[in-house]
Image (cartoon, helix red, strand yellow):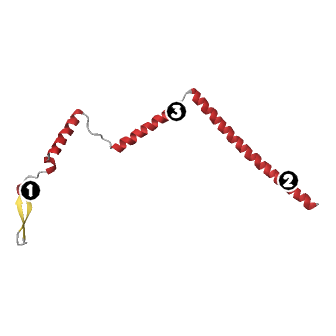
Amino acid sequence: MMLTLSVLYFADNSIKAEFIPSSSAEETFGPHVNPIKTSRTHQELHKELLLAHKKGKGLCSKPELQQVLERRRKEQTRKAEGAQARTPLEEELLKRQKKNTEQEGERVREEAQLMEFVRVRQNLKKIQAFHKTTNS
């Protein structure tokens, strides 16, 4: 057995509250009706969803943002694969380009070493000249 609270408000601002024994809440308050489910638009939408589900169309399981991100990722992978699928001529040109850049880098390093050698030699000449003038 279930107890339900009954509250009565009177015109003279007095309140009377009492517990009433009942077997269910529906007996006391009446059947619970959801106003959203009884609306016509909700019923039509529900029917449409059921028909779409029966046809196998269904709603998208992923949000729109996630779908867009996946589409972009696929496009990027396609572009990367397209870049990898090169013709033999393109591969040969890329090899030559790499070789030329490596040679250029080596040349720059050698020039830097040579310039350092020249600076050291010039410093030595200055030191020798200074010692000759001080010793004389």
| Furthest residue toward front | 41
Q: Position of residue 27 (x, y in %)?
A: 5, 55
Q: Is residue 36 toward the left or the right of residue 130 in the image?
A: left
Q: Earlier in the sequence, mark 1 or mark 2?
A: 1
The residue located at (85%, 57%) in the rendering is 127
Secondary element type, mark 2: helix
Which of pointers 3 and 2 lies earlier in the amino acid sequence? Answer: 3
Residue bearing mark 3: 84
Residue at position x 91%, y 59% in the image: 133
Mark 1 burial class by Cα count in 10 Å: few <14, some 14-19, many 20+: some
The residue at the point 82 percent across, 52 percent down is 122
Which is more foreground, mark 3 or mark 1? 3
- Three-letter code for the amino acid on which mark 1 is drawn: Ala
Is 68 or 62 nearer to us in this picture? 68
10 Å neighbourhood of mark 2: few (<14), some, or many (≥20)? few
Q: Position of residue 8 (x, y in %)?
A: 6, 66
Q: Which residue is mark 2?
A: 125
* Image: 10 above or below 69: below
Q: Quadrant of the C terminus?
A: bottom right
Where on the picture, by quarter, is residue 73? top left
Q: Check residue 25 in the rendering and tell me which mark sits there, or answer none.
A: 1
First in sequence: mark 3 or mark 1? 1
From the image, which quarter does the N terminus lie in?
A: bottom left
